[in-house]
Image (tube, grey):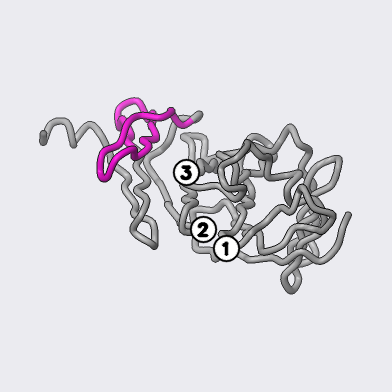
Amino acid sequence: MINHSSKTKHIVSISPDLKHLFVIKENRALGLSTYYRTYYGIFARQKESLPYKTNGEFKVKWIEKDIAAVTYQTPNWKIHQYIGTYGDRNGGHSYSYVGPSIHGQWQWENVRVTSATEGISIDYNGEMERYAWENIVQFGTIAIVLTKNDQAEWTIALSANFKSNSNEPIPPSGEIILNKATIGKNEPIRLEYVATE
């Protein structure tokens, strides 16, 4: 057991409501990491490998009670994110896409997120960044990662109170959560719907 633990690094984090367990195992020699999904109590099974080699630094942040974001760096110092999702926002009836679900403008103070036909833009303290759909990676049905120059920049997640209202003639309600992809300290920002695009 001691020999095995010296070869493998375990990243384990429990959700704030103590209902979900986020687990990653990293093969230290190879720099390859695997995400394990819990399936019964404390038991987990391998779900998928992280797409990039890691340099051993991981930051896990629960941005909602059922959404965990792990931020890590590759050996060439690029930032990447992997999102563990443990819920849904549509009652589990069908697969849904985050981008179209949040169509319109969302804002909190000097931060604005706009989801439109051509992609998603973020205005953060007066600096605007645009992300085409091919640079947006979806995790489960409740979170996406926005990438540029082959690295992660932002995560957008649907809060627990989010409702898409996709089958009704009213805009979405609740909040979305914007989280910066960084190894440093940061706080997720909750934005509210303000207008159609």
Separation of disc 3 and disc 1 at Cα? 16 Å
Please determine whether, in this image, residue 20 is positioned above or below residue 74.
Answer: below
Q: Residue sitting at 80 percent across and 53 percent down? A: 168
Say which of 107 and 78 sits in front: 107
Occupied quadrant, residue 176? bottom right
Please determine whether, in this image, residue 144 is positioned above or below residue 63.
Answer: above
Residue 56: percent from left, percent from top:
37, 41
**Are the residues tagged 3 and 2 within 8 Å (C-beta)?**
no
Mark 2: secondary structure: strand
Mark 1: secondary structure: loop
Callout 2 amino acid: Ile
Q: Residue sitting at 82 percent across and 55 percent down? A: 104
Residue 152: percent from left, percent from top:
61, 43
**Are the residues tagged 1 and 2 within 8 Å (C-beta)?**
yes
Callout 3 amino acid: Gly
Which label's residue is closer to the chain start, 3 or 2?
2
Say which of 148 and 67 sits in front: 67
Which label's residue is closer to the chain start, 1 or 2?
2
Name the chief secondary structure element in magenta: strand
Callout 1 amino acid: Pro
Asked if residue 5 lies left or right of residue 11, the reply is left
Circle on res. 128: none
Q: Which image quarter holds the N terminus? A: top left
Occupied quadrant, residue 160? bottom right
Q: Which residue is the site of mark 1? A: 188
Q: Which residue is the site of mark 3? A: 84
Q: Residue sitting at 71 percent across and 53 percent down? A: 164
Question: Which residues are the magenta region?
Answer: 25-50
Residue at the extreme bottom of the image, as rendered = 109
Separation of disc 1 and disc 2 at Cα? 7 Å
Q: Which residue is the site of mark 2? A: 63
Please determine whether, in this image, residue 155 is positioned above or below residue 52.
Answer: below
